[in-house]
Image (cartoon, helix red, strand yellow):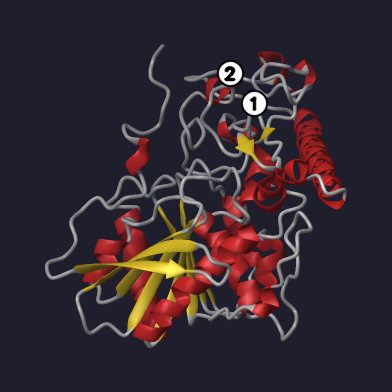
Amino acid sequence: MARIGRYDNPYEVAEWHRPLPSGTTCEPIKLVTDDRAVAHGWLYARGGEDTVVCAMHPRANFSRHYVVPGLVEAGFAVFCENSRWLNNDATLIHERVLLDVAAGLRFVHERYDRVVLLGNSGGGSLYTFYLSQALAPEGGRLTKTAAGDPLDLNAFEMPGAAAMAYVAAHPGEGHYLLHAIDPSVVEEGDPVSCDPALDPYDPANGFEPPPKESRYSPEFLTRYRAGQRARIERLDGIARERLARKRAARESGDLRGAMATDFMLVYRTDADPRYVDLSLDPSERDYGSLWGRRPDLINYGPVGFSRVVAPEAWLSTWSGTSSQAEIATTGARMTLPALVVDYRGDNAILPSDTELIASSLASPNVTRRSLPGDHYGFPAEKGRDGAVEEVASWLRGLS
C-alpha cells in the first residue's frame, strides 16, 4: 500500500528546524507541583532578557519547540515545559495539568520581569483554561474535575501572565474530537461496526478518495453533526457508568474495585467531513487530515486521538460536551492582550476554529495574523519563521 502519512518523521514535527543562535544556554528544570507530581522544563536564553515566552502542551513534547531559536535570537528567553502526562492522554486530567502550568510559571516569575504564554495547538486551550482559573475572582475557581472528583483550585497559588499568543491553536481537545469522531460506529466494542447512513467514507454519502474531492449534502452534514454529538454523549454515559461502579466499590470498602480502571476504547476518530470536502470551512489546506492523506483508512488504524482513555480522562479532556477546558467557555476570563496567528493550510485547525478562539476571548486587545503553512508551520520559512517574526514584533509593541 502506498504511504499515506503526511510527514516523513511525525515524531519531530514540532521540533526546531534550525540551530539555536550562538551563545544560547539550555537549563533543565525539575518542577515539583503542589499535588506532589513532577513536570519538566527547559529554559533557553543568552542572558540579559527581561521577557520570557512560555510554551507547553498537555501531553506533547515541547522541549525543543520550533519557536525557540527565532525567539531567542529576537532577544527573548523561552521556557518550554512538558507536563506530567508526556505522550500519555490515557489518564490525563486537564484540571491537574493546571498545577503543572502553575509550577512552571512560579519558576519563570522568579527570573523575569515579564511572562508571556504561547499556546500552540493543544497548548492554546490549556493556557486559556489555566488563565480562566488564575484570573478568577476570589473563591471562583473550579472545585471539581469534569468527572466530579474533588480538586479545589482555590487552594493553590496560580501566577498570572502579561499577555498570550496563540499559534495554530485549537479551541479545545473536546471541541476537536466532537468534529472528528465517526458517528457511524454502532457498537463501541467493535472497530468496524458501521451505520452506512452515517458513514462519511461511503461513496453513497458523497465521499471520493483522492485525487478526487468529496462533496457532502447539507442534509447529510446536519445528520452527521447530530450523530457526532450523540456518540460523544453516549461515550459520556459509558464513562459516568464506569465511574459510578468505582465509587460504589469505594463506598462498600472494595478497595480493588475502587482502584480498577475500566479503560475506554474509542474507535474511529479521524472523520471530520472537512478533511475531504474542501468546500467546507474553505482554506488553503490540501486533502486529508492532520495524520495523513487517506483519513478514510487512517480512521480505522491505531493512530489518532483518544483511542485508549480512562473514564476520568475522557470527561476531562476529550468530551466535547463535558470537558471544562473549552475556549468557548474559558475565554470569557482571558482578558490579557492576545495575538492570534493561524496557518492557512492547516489540516487540523480550520478558519471557524480560529474565529471561535478570537471571538471567545474577553481581551480588549486581540491582534490577528494569518500565514501560509500547515499545522506545524511548514514550509518553515513561510509558516513557522513568519509566526516567530509576528510574535516577536507583537511583543515589542507591547513594551
Could you tell me the amino acid type at mark 2? Glu
Instruction: Return the x and y of residue 174 as percentages of the image width and height.
Output: 67, 49
Q: Is residue 361 placed above or below 179 in the rendered structure? A: below
Could you tell me the amino acid type at mark 1? Arg
Secondary element at image label 2: loop
Q: Using the rendered image of the protein, determine whether residue 167 is visible from the camera's viewpoint.
A: no
Q: Which mark is residue 208?
A: 2
Foreground pick, 183 / 382: 183
**Earlier residue among tags 2 and 1:** 2
Foreground pick, 149 / 215: 149
* Structural crowding at the residue carrying mark 1, measured as other residues with C-alpha within 10 Å and reported as few (<14), some (14–19) or many (≥20): some
Picture residue at 33% right of the left edge, 61% below the top: 67
Q: Which residue is mark 1?
A: 215
Foreground pick, 223 / 329: 329
Secondary element at image label 1: loop
Q: Using the rendered image of the protein, determine whether residue 278 is visible from the camera's viewpoint.
A: yes
Picture residue at 34% right of the left edge, 55% below the top: 384
Question: In the image, is 59 to the left or to the right of 399?
Answer: right
Asked whether the beta carbons under mark 2 and mark 1 sit within 8 Å of each other, the answer is yes
Which residue is situated farthest in the top direction here? 1
* Structural crowding at the residue carrying mark 2, measured as other residues with C-alpha within 10 Å and reported as few (<14), some (14–19) or many (≥20): some
Count of numbered badges drawn on the protein: 2
Q: Is residue 40 placed above or below 235 in the rendered structure? A: below
Q: Pick the quarter of the image with the C terminus.
A: bottom left
Instruction: Return the x and y of residue 159 as percentages of the image width and height.
Output: 53, 81
Q: Is residue 9 placed above or below 138 in the rendered structure? A: above
